[in-house]
Amino acid sequence: MFSFIKLSQLRLFVTNFVSHSCKFLHHYHDYATLDQCIQIQRRFSKGHIYFEISCNLLPTKLSSECRFKFKVLKVNGTVNTDTQRLNYQSQYFTTPESDCQIIRPGSIMSEINKKFIVGYAKLGTSGCKKCKQKIEKGSLRIGKLSPNPFSEDGGQMKQWFHPTCLFETFARARASTTKLEDPEDAEGFNDLQEDDKQLIKKLIEDYQTKKGKPSKTEKPVAAKNENSLKNSDGKTEKRPASLSLDDSFRQFRRLCANIAEENSYLGKTKLVHDFITKGSSGDGYHGDLSVLIKLLLPGVMKSVYNLNNKQLVKLFSQIFATSLHKMIEDLERGDVAETIRLFFEESKAVVPLQKSDLTLQEVNKFLHELSQLTKEEDQQRILTKVAKRSTANDLKMFVRLIKHDLRINAGAKHILDGLHPDAYAAFQTSHDLEDVIQRVSQLSHVKPGMSTKLSVEASLMTPVLPMLAEACRSVEQAFKKSPDGFFAEIKYDGERVQLHKQGNEFKYYSRSLKPVLAHKVQHFKDFIPKAFPSSNDLILDAEVLLVDNKTGNPLPFGSLNVHKKAKFQDATVCLFVFDCLLINNENLMNKPIKFRRQILEDNMTPVKNHIHLSETKLITVADDLQNLMAKVFNEGLEGLVLKDINSIYEPGKRHWLKIKKDYLHDGSMADSADLVVLGAYYGTGNKGGMMSIFLMGTFDPDKQRWVTVTKCGIGFDDKKLEELNKELDMVKISKDMNLVPQWLELNKPLCPDFVVKDPTKSPVWEIIGAEFSQSELHTAHGISIRFPRVQKFRDDKTWKEATDLPRLKKLFEDSKKKTDLNLMKAIGAKNTITQETTSENDCHLVSQPKSRKRPLEINQENTAENKKTLLNIFHGCKILLPCDTPEYKQLKRYIIAFDGDIVPEFDVKSATHIIGSSKVVCTNETVPVVSTDWLWTCIREKKLIRVDAFKVKEIK
């Protein structure tokens, strides 16, 4: 009697045979196409034993069934007698050839007659037959197979269970009910992770112990070392024993995929929280939490691997013995990890494993080893080792870790919030991930009723994430945020430093929390004790500058560089202290700035040209701020930092304000530049494989050549980007300087992937940014634009009407002129309607607002008078103004000018008025939905009008 296996299962069976049977079989991938072959024969060899696999398809049942057998073909390189072959046959296989059945390796049984199936939930939509709960995606599940009475071809249906739920049903089942008494009775058992295999075995043992039944006699198999594993080259390596399934790299990849697919940030946090509380199997997390969180945040806890994209491609092309040129060409799509995965799958030199058995600990070890290496041959050795242990997706994720980007669109806040609600705040304060995880783990063991809040405080010799400032664009914005007044400090153009002092030990950290170079801070240890004679322990927030010994004035940014510092012989490195976070073990972070400032003044003695207290002024009147701003800008200083007198120190938060000259034009230059598209660069990530960053330039009439000004990648949506990729007439040069045309003057670091075929036919774009800047990289006399973006596509202009180099120089010079005090005050009184700028002509004059037929004409000549009359029309009103409202921009300016607040659509609950139409859906009946006529009437009457006559009818 023959046993059969379905044709659709043949490939899976042969793969399982190779992967899970006798260890001496070598793996091949070149299986013949099944629907074209009547007989399949492949030979697997190892040492001196040769095997033949034969599969004979029955002609009458070609589409559905086949039978095949495995037999020993040769021993020691020679054909042996039938007796010798049968001896070897019985040694390696459970069924001898003479039985005329399908021959299986010792541990593999027929998949046809099994009554149970095990595996991992694919979609998370199946439900447990017992507890009626959904089985989460990726979780272990067991299915009970039974005949399907509704199927004509005698198919089977599956009833899914959680593993524990299935064995609970066995406890109440009849004696005749089929039960899972041997793990090998379950289809797919050999495909499970080792921990899941042990879980099922333990459930079987526990069930049999309770029932008092002896377990099935296990089949004799060769002794297997559970702590050993094989690489793709057959070499055995030891691995840690008793690791949880939660520590598997495969589960880590699955978690990352789930996070990436989740659009909601709260949903991403929930996925992390569920995994570290329930684990992979749902019975709790049993893995290494520290390693998991560290790998989920590769961009936060960065290690340096000294490998850029092209270096990675070069090394892996050697490992895979494939074409470097082809890999570089594929790299243009913008995803180096995906490129390496694709070529790994095609590699013959190093073959990817079929199933992942890497652990997080092993991956973390590989990454640590890689971070210690700088030579290419050493890096290649480690990467080869990783490749031999990886599946294609394993290696892809490993490369993502090297690049510090998992592509899951989740930052430290979303991951750490899943760990504990206070974990992110604690991490911002201490920046010690291990400490935060350890403290969270300790909280899980507290007794009921005790506090589970995580303490957030500074720790000596551990850097604190610095508090930051957001841009302030008007005097009114400053007083609106800080009505009780604020400290205005000089914004020094130096390098921010966080100083930690514990006794006689000193440490200095940069803004990015890295150690500061010794030549910048090493001499402070001699002056800090003099400046703080009574302070044993300190954490100071400060700025390091080079000051002129004669005048005491700070020198330009960048002068702290070793080589540039040598140019200033009569200068000294000076520390300007502006905040204190800790003093003599007293944490001051939760104290207001006015208290922290007083502590500094009481405990600090300035040391001339070495340790200074930052210059600050208490501001309570708008005129004082305007005068101070004009003075600071006229002296060529960078700007001011404003700090609410009642504000505490919040690490990483942008709750201070900073005023710079360029911020006072709504974050843009007073003038724009009409530049010509000269080239383009491939984008990365979602924009990989397409031109998404453009090289902008201008014409130099003296040299009769085109020169570069800036690179711009902001100002167009996806649709516009697609149009540009189709319309622009480009020539691909792949950053090869030898292919740069003669008409373009270009520095090598800016060499693009594409250049335009003819710059005189290239489009003109209006470019605006924060300010004009100087850059040695660009060839337009070093003139560039800081934070450039496309303001407008000037289809009405050609290269002849665009800004040329002489005009660009004039714009640059005008932007550096000193600020006039009257202009400063005019900018400060910006509660009136702001006018928009345009560049319809080459002079870039400020355009006047278009006239409109409205009952009210506002006289803007007397700003102060206007302010007194119209200041509080919408006082206390929080108005939701949809973006598609007619004349949206003008209405928005009126509302803000007359002391109203614009509420974003996602915060509709806080709105007092909603501007809408009859189509507006309003769930809160207490909030009036009114037409725009209500706004215009209020403006005309110069007072707040009742809404009754303006409510939108038929609100649903």
Image (cartoon, rainbow, N blue to C red):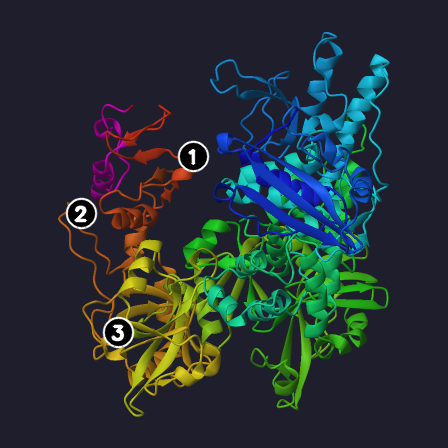
**Residue 168: image x %, image y %?**
73, 16
Would you say residue 284 is visible in this rendering?
Answer: no
Looking at marks 2 and 3 on the same chain, the residue that comes earlier in the sequence is marked by: 3
Would you say residue 675 is visible in this rendering?
Answer: yes
Q: Is residue 757 above or below residue 584?
A: below
Residue that carries the numbered disc 2 in the rendered image: 856
Q: Residues within 10 Å of mark 3 (few under 14, many from 20)?
A: some
Residues rendered magenta in the picture = 930-955
- What residue do we see at 74% from left, 61% from top? 368
Q: Residues within 10 Å of mark 1 (few under 14, many from 20)?
A: some
Q: Nearer the viewer, mark 1 or mark 2?
A: 1
**Residue 623: image x %, image y %?**
43, 62
Residue that carries the numbered disc 1 in the rendered image: 910
Looking at marks 1 and 2 on the same chain, the residue that comes earlier in the sequence is marked by: 2
The quarter holding residue 454 reads: top right
Which sits in the foreground, 480 or 540?
540
Looking at marks 1 and 3 on the same chain, the residue that comes earlier in the sequence is marked by: 3
Q: Is residue 846 above or below residue 452?
A: below
Q: Nearer the viewer, mark 1 or mark 3?
A: 3
